[in-house]
Image: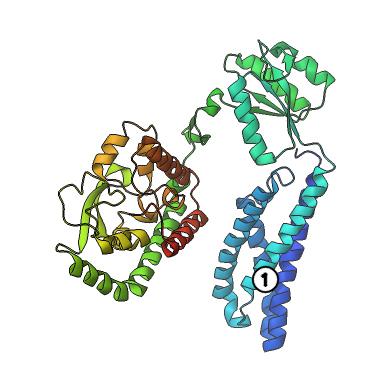
């Protein structure tokens, strides 16, 4: 898909450079003119600022893949790349600006300038991409080998990246399969390529061809400007796909890591947990805690807090802190609370309905045992029981447990009398782990606050 479209890529780069300079220097010069005029020091510094702004953008765009396969990839994915590229660029250029130019210009123009640039660049990317797609052929490919499940998975993956403009022309193989058009055997590849020029990629699934045969196919493709790519037969073994790692000179295929396995994401989540927890503790606890403690003490005898061992990160137990909502009883570590449970106090029912009983867990977050958002921690007995009944149950311990979670805000909280209820909870927890993002956490927190205000039927 990238062939004969370099001019459009260069057009996108050129337009981005125009928008970038217009936005930055438009806002900058207007503010300078309004505030202090064009002093000689300002005019001397402008060329250096121009140089920094453009060089840093080109480097940032290169490393964030803003222009990689510009015309082929789905628009939402490219806008996402553009957004993160601009965000990283804003951070870098802010450091440079405040380090070297702040004393000269003394203006605050970066944020409105970058939002304007992001808007204009998104519009131009959209326009160029649509222009290209209306005048060029989409991704057409053929495969060598592979079975029905391999080919279906491949088509889904390619469609998720390139959209609807993806077409599998057919398959070369020893035996025909009903899922795709048969183009002949491996020996027919050369004859087909000589007569047809309707594919841009040849994807190789075979593992039993000789090196000499494979090299011959590669040469045939190269002579006809067709991309030859190798796809492992086990491509559909892992739900999230596979990644290639290099150990010395040995390539290794492994399961694609979840987002929270990456160090930058871990740091972002931990910093957010600490900041959010401190805000809750400083702003809410001083006035709410005395009231809650007074209500607990007035209604029943026993401790203010309820500490229970629960399963945590990497299956390690920790003490989860809650406000006590039940009469002191011996079954609290083995038996879940149920609707109209006689052990729950009147105020305890209110605390559960509004999630107030969970607030002390922000201390668990500060300690590092929990996160603000994540799979809810279960009692040790439940972990032992359900891990034998539900396949993916233990996956939920690959991240820190949370005060709230995707399963809870999706309606799967409360007692799990039936196995399917726990199964759905685990399904949502795994979905959260595999698709984590900072905005996903924000969404869960927003829905939690919304549910706290209106109350939840399953909270008791």
Q: Is 16 above or below relative to 170?
A: below
Categorize mark 1 by other alpha carbons within 10 Å: few (<14), some (14-19), many (20+): many
148 vs 30, nearest the viewer:
148
Q: Position of residue 225 (x, y in %)?
A: 77, 30
Q: Is 100 above or below relative to 449?
A: below
Q: Name the residue under label 1.
A: 113
Q: Where is residue 60 in the image (x, y as percent from the top left)?
A: 62, 57
Q: Where is residue 81 in the image (x, y as percent from the top left)?
A: 63, 52
Residue 38 seen in the figure: no
311 vs 252, nearest the viewer:
311
Q: Residue at (82%, 26%) from the top-left corner?
A: 197
Q: Residue at (37%, 63%) from the top-left corner?
A: 274
350 vs 234, nearest the viewer:
350
Which quarter of the rendered picture does the C terminus lie within? bottom left
Q: Where is residue 345 in the image (x, y as percent from the top left)?
A: 24, 60
Q: Residue at (66%, 10%) from the top-left corner?
A: 174
| Relative side of 447 to 460, left or right | right
Q: Residue at (72%, 38%) from the top-left corner?
A: 164
């Amino acid at each position: 898909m990238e062939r004969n479209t370099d001019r459009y890529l260069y057009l996108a780069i050129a337009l981005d450079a125009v928008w970038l300079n217009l936005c930055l220097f438009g806002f900058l010069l207007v503010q300078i003119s309004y505030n202090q005029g064009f002093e000689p020091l300002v005019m001397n510094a402008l060329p250096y600022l121009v140089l920094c702004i453009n060089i840093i953008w080109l480097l940032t765009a290169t490393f964030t893949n803003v222009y990689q396969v510009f015309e082929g990839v789905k628009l939402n994915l490219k806008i996402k790349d553009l957004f993160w590229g601009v965000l990283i660029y804003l951070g870098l250029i802010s450091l440079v600006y405040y380090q070297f130019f702040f004393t000269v210009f003394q203006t605050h123009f970066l944020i409105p300038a970058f939002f304007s640039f992001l808007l204009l660049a998104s519009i131009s990317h959209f326009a160029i991409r649509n222009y290209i797609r209306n005048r060029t052929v989409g991704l057409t490919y053929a495969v060598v080998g592979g079975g029905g499940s391999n080919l279906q998975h491949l088509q889904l993956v390619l469609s998720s990246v390139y959209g609807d403009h993806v077409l599998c022309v057919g398959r070369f193989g020893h035996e025909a399969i009903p899922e795709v058009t048969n183009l002949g055997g491996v020996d027919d590849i050369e004859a087909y390529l000589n007569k047809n020029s309707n594919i841009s990629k040849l994807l190789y699934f075979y593992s039993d061809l000789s090196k000499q045969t494979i090299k011959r196919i590669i040469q045939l493709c190269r002579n006809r400007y067709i991309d030859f790519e190798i796809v492992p037969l086990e491509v559909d073994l892992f739900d999230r796909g596979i990644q290639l790692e290099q150990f010395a000179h040995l390539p290794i295929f492994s399961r694609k890591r979840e987002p929270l396995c990456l160090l930058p994401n871990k740091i972002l989540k931990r910093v957010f947990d600490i900041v959010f927890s401190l805000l809750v503790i400083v702003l809410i606890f001083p006035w709410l805690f005395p009231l809650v403690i007074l209500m607990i003490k007035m209604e029943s005898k026993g401790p203010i807090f309820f500490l229970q061992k629960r399963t945590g990160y990497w299956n390690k137990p920790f003490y989860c802190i809650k406000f006590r909502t039940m009469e002191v009883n011996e079954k609290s570590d083995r038996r879940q609370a149920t609707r109209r449970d006689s052990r729950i106090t009147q105020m305890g029912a209110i605390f559960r309905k509004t999630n107030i009983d969970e607030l002390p867990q922000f201390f668990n977050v500060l300690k590092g045992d929990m996160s603000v958002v994540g799979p809810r921690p279960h009692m040790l007995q439940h972990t032992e029981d359900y891990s034998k009944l539900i396949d993916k149950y233990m996956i939920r311990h690959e991240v820190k447990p949370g005060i709230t979670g995707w399963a809870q805000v999706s309606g799967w909280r409360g007692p799990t009398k039936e196995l399917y209820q726990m199964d759905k909870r685990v399904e949502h927890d795994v979905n959260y782990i595999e698709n984590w993002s900072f905005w996903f956490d924000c969404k869960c927190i927003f829905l939690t606050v919304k549910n706290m205000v209106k109350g939840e039927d399953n909270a008791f």
